[in-house]
Amino acid sequence: MKLFGKKKQKQEKEINFQAALQQKQMDVLDEEEVYLKGLARVLDLIAPSAIGINPSYLQIGSVYCRTIFVATYPNSLSMGWLNRIIGVEIPTDVSLFIHPVNTNSVLKKLRKKSTQIQSEMNIEQERGITRDPVLEMAFSNVEQLRDRLQEGSEKFFSFGLYFNIFGESLDELEKNSAFLESLLNTRSMYAKKAIFRAKEGFTSCIPLGKDELLNTTALNTSPLSTAFPFVSADVTSGQGILYGINMHNNSLVLFDRFSMENANMVVFAKSGAGKSYAVKLEMLRALMLGTSGIIIDPENEYEYLAKAVGGTFINISLTSDQHLNPFDLPFRQGAEMVDILRSNIADLIGLFKLMFGAMTPEEEATLENAIRETYAVRDINENTSVEDLDKKAYPLMDD
């Protein structure tokens, strides 16, 4: 009996020890949880102080927000109809949701609709009623859409277009909301407020990709493609030069392409449209901001322009006194003489390959040694100071 009693006491001690250890771990976790709750997270920093939910709008901190959605669309939509709407001068967020629809289910509904319209037309014809152009147009549109869906040239989608409208006050919100609704009405679109669904509407317009409003309209590919806003509402930056006027909203196009990672530009236009004038004007405006320009001008169009702004015009021809010397070493700020010389020797070898054709490795090595010796004759080598380059007489092709 004593043996079993000792064993039972040992088990009880083990259980009590495990319980105490578990309780200690829970206390540590509770302390860590309390500590983490006291830390400021990124979400805490960007979140508003409070959100008030009303039937037709939200109050997010000191800003008011209302969501409206487009309920109906006109029979035909022109390309770019959304551009003017998103370019309005009121604070607005726009969200477009496109949900694919099964083609087979759409074809069944269209077949049923086509039969219904045709039956109405037959009944009116039997009664001797004058033909109805509206029914005939509807029947033609349904049949045309059925053909395109069966061919695969068109698809069907549920399209949702939502707007989050903001205002610093409730009066400003009402004013902005009325302005946008009237603008949609001028395009034969009927917009509704998200009554009692303000939270879902706001969430649908923030960049989460969630359509919680689900107020959509069935559209096929052709009219849906017209809703894509390919035009930027504003192409004005805080720096740069004037390129022109945005014809969609009459704003100035100010841009500095040299501030981008790639500053390349290409100009397309028909003959006589002003391509040369536009490039010259850009060059003059860029010079005002301290941008240097080098122009390859085979037709001498820029000679007078270069002289007018104090530039240098180099006439390169067989009879000209001015020539390009490929042996000139370009001076680059902060570059070592070793890198400058090696880079130019590689360029010279490439030039001679173009002039002489293909070379064997032995010929290329001999050519490189000859180029180095030619530089050495003029006291130019890897030990030459970069600051003394402009004082050296560079080799010529005759050397």
Image (cartoon, rainbow, N blue to C red):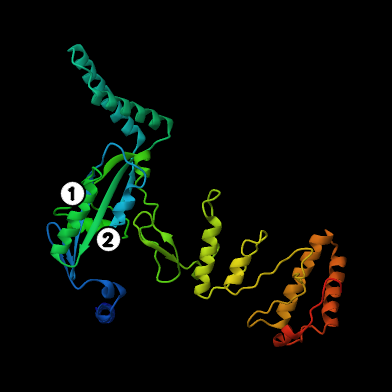
| Image point (79%, 83%), residue name | 380
Element assignment for label 1: strand
Q: Nearer the viewer, residue 255 or 51?
A: 255
**Disc 1: which residue:** 192
Mark pair 2, 1: CA separation: 21 Å
Residue 291 percent across, percent down from the top left? 54, 73
Q: Which of labels 2 and 1 is toward the front?
A: 2
**What secondary structure is marked by label 2?**
loop
Residue 104 position in % (x across, y down)? 35, 32
* Quarter of the image where one finds residue 374: bottom right
| Residue named by callout 2 | 89
Mark 2 surroundings within 10 Å by alpha-carbon count, few (fewer than 14), some (14 through 19), many (20 or more): few
Q: Is residue 378 left or right of residue 56?
A: right
Confirm whether residue 255 shows in the render.
Answer: yes
Q: Residue at x 79, y 60 (%)?
A: 354
Could one spot residue 17 in this view of the protein? no
The answer to whether residue 120 is left or right of residue 242 is left
Q: Amino acid at mark 2?
A: Glu
Residue 72 lies, in percent from the top left, at: 23, 42
Tell me if 270 is positioned left or right of 251 in this view: right
Q: Which quadrant of the rendered structure holds the N terminus?
A: bottom left
Closest to the observer, 376 or 72: 376
Residue under the point 26% across and 62% down: 91
Q: CB of mark 2 within 8 Å of CB of mark 1?
A: no
